Image (cartoon, rainbow, N blue to C red):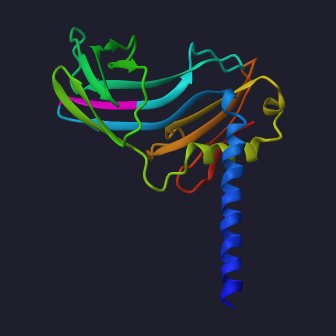
Amino acid sequence: MKKFGLFILLSLLLTTIFFLSACSNGFKKYTKSVSEYRDDVFEGADADFSVEAMSGYRESPFEIDGRSGEKMDFCLVTISPREFDPLATYHYKVKLGEVEYEGDCVKHPFENTYSFEVAARCVDPTFNVEINGKSVELRSVKSELFITPEKAFEIALKRLGDNDIIKKKDHEIYIRLIKNPVNSSGGYFWYVAFVDEEQATCAVLIQPETMEITAVRE
């Protein structure tokens, strides 16, 4: 009986390893077509600012044309002052990994926000942004229950696999963690999209904890 139980345990273990390997290899098959992989969003605030950051890697130069070129890491930080002053200027400092970046924020042309971008990824659950000498801590919006972007891709591919856009030789893929676009209840979703050279798009919106497909574009 002990040998039989051990055999069952080993069989389950091998099945699990095979399944995980298959999922991983399934995504690797498509990585060259990924034009944006935005796998984390961060939020923070103090008495003067609310701050949001998004990080990952993406095509550079970025162009929606059905093809994916060279990639670069990025971290885009947006600063929203509590009291907007059109004459104000904001200087930032941020350390990602072992490298410190600093410079002046850029005013958004239409909104009352400022932003900056650096060619680096944030892989830690928290980091600090210094604005005019004042530090604001940002924390990842992801919980331990969030599925990985690779799992979100797997769900999207299973749902959209028969779409003509995906069957084309030339298409590009976007995997993004985005704010809830469906209603005002808040939260974040995984957005996975396939785009061809004519900018035709098929996409799904996935709840990151339940894995439910909330919306589909075909």
Residue 206 percent across, percent down from the top left: 60, 46
- Tell me what residue is drawn at x 67 percent, y 21 percent: 68
Q: How many marks?
A: 0
Left or right position of 17 against 177: right
Q: Quadrant of residue 162?
A: top right
Q: Quadrant of the C terminus?
A: top right
Q: Nearer the viewer, residue 153 or 50?
A: 153
Residue 65 percent across, percent down from the top left: 69, 16
The residue segment tinted magenta is 48-53
Q: Quadrant of residue 47?
A: top left
Specify the farthest residue to the top.
87
- Tell me what residue is drawn at x 83 percent, y 32 percent: 167
Q: Quadrant of residue 191?
A: top right
Q: Nearer the viewer, residue 213 or 105?
A: 105
- Tell me what residue is drawn at x 82 percent, y 25 percent: 169
Residue 92 percent across, percent down from the top left: 25, 19
Residue 131 percent across, percent down from the top left: 22, 23
Specify the farthest residue to the front.
3
What secondary structure is the magenta-colored segment mainly? strand
- Tell me what residue is drawn at x 28 percent, y 32 percent: 50
Left or right position of 43 against 211: left
Q: Quadrant of the N terminus?
A: bottom right
Left or right position of 88 against 34: left
- Up-down relation of residue 78 to residue 10 (above or below): above
Q: Is residue 67 magenta?
A: no
